[in-house]
Image (cartoon, coloured by chain):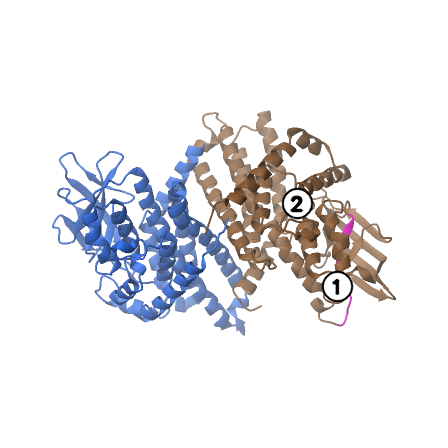
Chain colours: A blue, B brown
């Protein structure tokens, strides 16, 4: 066992932290909330320039061929900064699906564009796939889908009732794919409602077999948990700093055990989340047979812990935490949406219990 | 990152498993269960000696003290396999995991050479004399005094929560040597043989029916000045070093939590509901509750490995051990409470169920001690918030 990051991985973290601090200060996040943009293009281009959009793309297609742990490090930093970029759907899920299932032509067509920051991709169809009838008609509705509004490309998991699924590729100009803006309380990201009708068009060359479906589920759940964890760490830092500065009754409120013990419990929960999330991210590349269970476990823990920490951050800030002058509210809103997408909490609990039933 | 055994680790783990399979036999368990008090301790001394001979007792220690200079990860493998094999309670942990590591770090060469090897192989059983009736969490205010008289110290006072003192050979005592200094700057630590004249040891009966704890009374107890460990008036540093090692030792409970999770599943599978229509595992709320603690048990094991990687440079474990201590002892309590909830839904008129109930009852009661010993959960939260998060005192 060696449960720690390599020096290279620590350097990646440092480099993403610096890049994000420069390109995505909190002023940028607030400005994004007032804008019409699909995502923060400045940050997206910086991530492309530094090679982070190609983390899961082979060098032959313009990527940097790193791995899921490295992608997870990027996601964690992005989550901490409340960044508005479609990294999980585009640079992680779509890059992985196209790289594994695409024909040479499809890979050559899309992967370099993802690595270069030229397109954004939304992924629909997990955990509920679209159904395809015998005559090839697709039926599917999903909302809210992260980064769907304004995405250049949609990848849709299509289930024809057999063990394998297909992954449909739809360009956003396709009339059968209806994507509408889906407004939510989370102003740090754009969501969409997707409604699919019509027939199956282009699909990735190879089918998504059960192992591939498990991998996709694991990538989305572990990736989302990693991104959420970054937000929780920032929210805890905010509450801790405030508890050191805010004076009441002639002393910092951080001297009161009601506050101290709340924050101590947060750290215990966050350390546990770190262990399970990093294990899940590691297992995707190194122990695929465990990855889905590890990832839904991580997402299930994140769903609880991240919302708890974000919510208590508002409580520690008192009245000012309830205003938009302080950014505490942004973490709660984002955490709530994260709980709903990539498999809601009930989905993860169901999978865990199902696994337990198998043991029984 | 490598969350698997390396080939060397896998070989070592296979060796540990084989060895435990051959030595922790049913006969051994029966013999152990039939003994009490001093006979049981003597039986466990032999067991500690066997672990030592097999190279498992103090694997990460330096060769010079009987260890194998092995990485901490091999200690973790031993802990994990001991938990998986339902090994008996580690009564030598206070000497092996707390006092000896402190002696190796802070004691004089002659003290290290005299005491450490005899701790390693179970020849000597050690206990700790820290808490007093009026000073538990507020340890630095303790009042037991050690007054210098020529080349001796004379000790007067009372200690409590002294584990195994009634059976042990030595006590590592924390006493006040300077009345004029601030509370934590006037304390010193001493090695006290428990056969010394003037010592009176009285066992306490615990809520789980056992007698592990004692009160110890010191009435003009004289010890030589060579019994001092570390600097005169430097006892607080010694005590804090021991508490850090203690928390690391207690967090091995993470492996115990995973074993407990397996036992909860086995219990829920084997137990019928009172109406006889279902096994408990078939009930959705039972599955949900077991899954919830199972996730936390998984986290506890992962935390063990991750925190071990942080200490692998041989440093003293830091305040992060409080995270594990708090997490695993509270989880251990929650899991035992769940076990009783499960059994409560079974037919307790059935003699088999009743037998299972008795043993879970005892374990449940024991779980209460763990959120108190080694610093209460509330003290752990103070340590975490002050030393890890930097909140003001």
Quarter holding the C terminus of chain B is bottom right
Task: Please state the horizontal and vertical placement of residue B234, each as a whole percent of the image.
Answer: 72, 66
Foreground pick, A278 / B176: A278
Residue drawn at x 31%, y 61% as measured from the top left: A51
- Residue B137 seen in this snapshot: no
Residue drawn at x 68%, y 32% as measured from the top left: B28
Tag 1 secondary structure: strand
Tell whether B371 sits left or right of B231: left
Label 1 chain ID: B
Task: Please state the horizontal and vertical placement of residue A166, each as a whole percent of the image.
Answer: 22, 41
Which corner quadrant of the image does residue A208 belong to?
A: top left
Instruction: Tell me the CA gap for discs 1 and 2.
Output: 29 Å
Residue at the front extreme, as displayed: A60
Q: Residues within 10 Å of mark 2 (few under 14, many from 20)?
A: many
Residue B171 falls inside the magenta stretch: yes
In this view, B4 is above or below B20: below
Which corner quadrant of the image does residue A329 belong to?
A: bottom left
Residue labelled with disc 2? B57
The magenta segment is: B169-180
Residue labelled with disc 1? B188
* Circle nearer the viewer, 1 or 2: 2
């Amino acid at each position: 066992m060696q449960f720690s990051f390599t020096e290279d991985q620590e350097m990646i973290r440092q480099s993403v932290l610096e890049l994000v601090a420069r390109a995505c200060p909190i002023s940028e996040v607030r400005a994004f909330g007032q804008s019409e943009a699909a995502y923060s293009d400045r940050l997206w281009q910086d991530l492309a320039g530094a090679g982070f959009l190609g983390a899961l793309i082979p060098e032959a297609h313009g990527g940097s061929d790193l791995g899921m742990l490295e992608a997870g490090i990027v996601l964690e930093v992005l989550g901490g900064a409340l960044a508005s970029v479609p990294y999980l759907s585009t640079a992680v899920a779509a890059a992985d699906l196209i790289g594994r299932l695409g024909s040479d032509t499809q890979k050559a067509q899309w992967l370099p564009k993802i690595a270069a920051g030229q397109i954004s991709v939304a992924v629909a169809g997990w955990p509920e796939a679209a159904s395809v009838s015998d005559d090839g008609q697709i039926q599917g509705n999903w909302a809210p889908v992260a980064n769907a509004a304004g995405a250049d490309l949609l990848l849709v998991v299509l289930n024809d009732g057999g063990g394998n699924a297909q992954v449909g590729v739809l360009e956003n100009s396709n009339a059968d794919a209806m994507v509408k803006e889906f407004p939510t309380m989370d102003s740090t990201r754009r969501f969409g409602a997707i409604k699919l009708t019509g027939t199956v068009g282009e699909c990735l060359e190879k089918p998504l077999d059960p192992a591939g479906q498990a991998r996709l589920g694991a990538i989305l759940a572990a990736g989302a948990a990693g991104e959420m964890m970054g937000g929780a760490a920032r929210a805890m830092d905010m509450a801790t700093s405030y508890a050191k500065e805010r004076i009441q009754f002639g002393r910092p409120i951080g001297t009161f055990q009601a506050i101290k013990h709340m924050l101590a419990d947060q750290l215990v929960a966050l350390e546990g989340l770190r262990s399970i999330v990093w294990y899940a991210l590691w297992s995707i590349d190194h122990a695929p047979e465990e990855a889905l269970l590890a990832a839904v476990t991580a997402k299930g823990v994140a769903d609880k812990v991240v919302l708890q920490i974000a919510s208590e951050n508002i409580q520690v800030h008192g009245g000012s935490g309830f205003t938009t002058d302080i950014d505490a509210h942004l973490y709660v809103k984002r955490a709530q949406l994260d709980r709903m997408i990539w498999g809601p909490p009930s989905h993860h609990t169901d999978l865990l219990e199902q696994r337990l039933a198998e043991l029984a | 990152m490598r969350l698997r055994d390396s080939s060397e680790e896998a070989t070592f783990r296979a060796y540990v498993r084989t060895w435990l399979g051959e030595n922790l036999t049913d006969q051994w368990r029966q013999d152990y269960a039939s003994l009490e008090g001093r006979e049981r301790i003597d039986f466990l001394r032999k067991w500690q000696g066997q672990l030592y001979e097999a190279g498992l007792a103090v694997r990460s220690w330096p060769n010079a003290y009987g260890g194998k200079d092995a990485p901490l990860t091999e200690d973790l493998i031993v802990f994990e396999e001991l938990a998986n094999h339902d090994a008996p309670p580690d009564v030598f942990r206070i000497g092996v995991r707390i006092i000896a590591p402190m002696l190796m770090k802070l004691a004089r060469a002659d003290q290290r050479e005299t005491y450490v090897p005899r701790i390693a192989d179970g020849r000597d059983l050690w206990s700790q004399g820290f808490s007093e009736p009026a000073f538990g969490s507020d340890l630095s205010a303790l009042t037991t005094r050690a007054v210098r008289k020529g080349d001796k110290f004379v000790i007067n006072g009372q200690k409590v929560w002294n584990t195994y003192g009634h059976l042990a050979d030595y006590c590592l005592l924390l006493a006040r040597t300077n009345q004029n200094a601030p509370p934590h700057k006037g304390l010193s630590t001493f090695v006290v043989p428990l056969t010394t004249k003037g010592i009176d040891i009285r066992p306490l009966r615990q809520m789980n029916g056992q007698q592990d704890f004692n009160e110890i009374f010191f009435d003009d107890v004289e010890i030589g000045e060579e019994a001092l460990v570390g600097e005169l008036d430097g006892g607080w540093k010694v005590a804090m070093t021991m508490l850090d090692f203690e928390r690391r030792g207690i967090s091995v409970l993470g492996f115990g939590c995973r074993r407990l999770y397996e036992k909860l599943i086995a219990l829920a599978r084997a137990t019928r509901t009172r109406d006889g229509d279902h096994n408990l595992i078939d009930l959705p709320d039972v599955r949900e509750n077991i899954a919830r603690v199972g996730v936390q048990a998984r986290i506890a094991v992962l935390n063990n490995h991750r925190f071990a990687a942080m200490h692998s440079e041989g440093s003293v474990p830091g305040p992060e051990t409080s995270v594990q201590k708090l997490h695993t002892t509270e989880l251990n309590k929650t899991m035992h409470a769940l076990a009783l909830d499960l059994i409560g839904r079974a037919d307790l008129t059935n003699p088999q169920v009743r037998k299972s109930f008795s043993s879970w009852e005892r374990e449940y009661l024991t779980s209460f001690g763990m959120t108190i010993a080694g610093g209460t959960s509330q003290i752990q939260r103070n340590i975490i918030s002050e030393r890890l998060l930097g909140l003001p005192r």
